[in-house]
Amino acid sequence: MSAAVETSAEPRTLPRPAWGRHLVAVAVLAVVLAFVPLVLAPAQQSVAVRVLIFAILSLGWNIMSGFGGMFSFGHAAYFGLGAYTSVWLLVEHDVSPWIGMLAGMVVAAAFAVVIGFLALRYRLKGAYFALSTFAFAEMLRLLALNSDFVNRAVGYNVPLRSEGSWAYMQFPPGSANYFWIALALTVIALVVTILFLRSKVGRFTIAVRDDEDAAAALGIPVMRTKLLTVALSGAMTSVAGTFYVQYYFFVDPDIAFGSSVSIQAILPAVIGGVGTIWGPVIGAAILGPLNDVTATLLRNPPPGLEFLQGRAGLDVIVYAVLLILIVLLLPQGVYGALRDRWQRR
Amino acid sequence: MTLLEVTNVSKSFRGLRAVDDVSFTVEEGSILGIIGPNGAGKTTLFNCVAGAVSPDTGRVHLGGTDLTGAAPHKVSRAGMARTFQLMKPFGSMSVLENVAVAAMAHGTPRRTATGTAADVVDRVGLGHWRDARSDGLPTAGLKRLELARALASRPRVLLLDEVLAGLLPAERAPVMELLETLRSEDGVTLVFVEHIMAAVMRLSDSVLVLEQGRVLTSGSPQEVTSDPRVIEAYLGEEPTGAGA
């Protein structure tokens, strides 16, 4: 059968996936960003670290919700499990946070599989699925808030050491090591994302997202594919939690499991581009510095904006406006829009 | 040799008997056409056979293996592929990626899946559109994509749910030729639901007529189309012209 289908309007052509080029881009970015601490003042460096934490958090969210199509409003659960698992092991058993990080990934992945199984077994979809993820994160927050096992509302302080230690992921204030560790973790998260998308499971994940029934009919085990996706997503997000505690020396139930964490997992991806490799990173780079820009603006408003002096909440307003603008003007996010423009050339 | 054996399958939805005690067998390498008026239960029967829904009663065997109530992906892996009447592309992927995923789901390694997919895509006449985003294809392209994905899973039995519907008459001929080649060269057993009588008459070795969930009759295309009950129930007055 050779007769081609008659064409009226030509459908859009997609470029063949260029995984190698993405990996090269990650490598270039890693090398360039490695020099950042040499040029940034300590205050700016802490903003850069926050950007990277946002990026890891959102890269994790993007696996499950962007590529997997299962919208999570509860990624605080995985962030918090990563934070609490590692800090509990550190404080109670003097276990290195590096090992704590791995343990947190396992715990978060296991929790993701359990709640994923429950939500999917009962065929929760769309808003109901999102609400169930939110409920599980809240459940963990309340559990942490009410169990002596993890110090209730007090949470944990990371014990300070007299000198820097790689084994304990602790360095003198302002050390560039924090940035480099966060950068390395972000790079690993990006590489894992790319390798995942390229892999069989990754292709299955996209297929299941696009059409579950067709995927099943073609022999793809839908439930197993989804559970692998949520496990990877939870594990990746938990890394952000572990690093967060080591960087800020403190965690409590609200910081770990509060819904604002879940929102911070979603926003970078939405602004950068949901379901794109680079979206969360770009979104984090836009959102991360916003707090500081608005805070500076409120402290020393430029001429004409003096009424802003000493007000609070500008960052929230800017977030909201930015989000509305992105959703209206760039529904595919910043990266998605740029990519489309590039491809149309 | 009997490849597919469906025995006394029934399925109700909220008290409505969509499929009522249907049995049939399909010989290896043969083509069975299933016809019936709208609402006769053809798609529900397909769903029962392919595992998309479990039948309330009855059994489905493929080459001696009991697949009754098995999950769709297990039915697929056992060698039964299906297409959907309402096409279900993986919209964000290109045509080639759609087919490559199907090949991978059946054990083709990732590295060779694209090559395998390209052959299948060429075979169904979609070569020109292999890099097109699949949700931008017109109906004719989507029907062929359904077929291509099913073929990429190298099935023993292929269930086709109205692959010709929505195609222009000129577009049907090559698809029908392809189906004939599949049987003669690849030895694929075909079960197809179709409204277009010309296609049913030309392709089928035997025909099963459903009406209100039940088997009205079955037999060779000639026997079936000359059966007065069939003419009354489904074909109206002009058997060979209906729907074509």
Image (tube, rainbow, N blue to C red):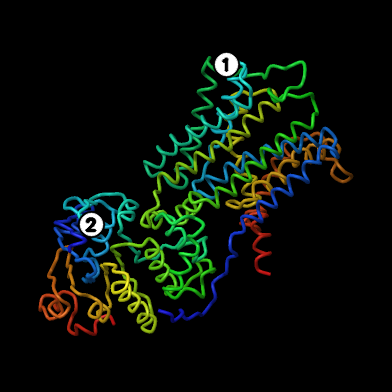
Tell me the CA gap for discs 2 and 1: 59 Å
Relative to A256, B109 lies left or right: left
Q: Residue at x 89, y 44 (%)?
A: A303
Q: Is residue B74 above or below residue A162?
A: below
Query: For residue A290, what is the image quadrant?
Result: top right
Number of residues whose C-alpha sits closer than 10 Å to that of mark 1, classed few (under 14), some (14–19) or many (20 or more): some
Query: For residue A86, what is the image quadrant?
Result: top right
Q: Please give the residue where the numbered disc 1 appears in the rendered image.
A: A151
Mark 2 touching mark 1, by CB under 8 A? no
Quadrant in which the N terminus of chain A is drawn: bottom left
Number of residues whose C-alpha sits closer than 10 Å to that of mark 2, classed few (under 14), some (14–19) or many (20 or more): many
Q: What number is the disc on residue B62? A: 2
Q: What type is the residue that disc 1 sits on?
A: Asn
Q: What type is the residue that disc 2 sits on?
A: Leu
Local SS, label 2 = strand
Q: Chain of mark 2?
A: B
Between circles 2 and 1, the one closer to the viewer is 2
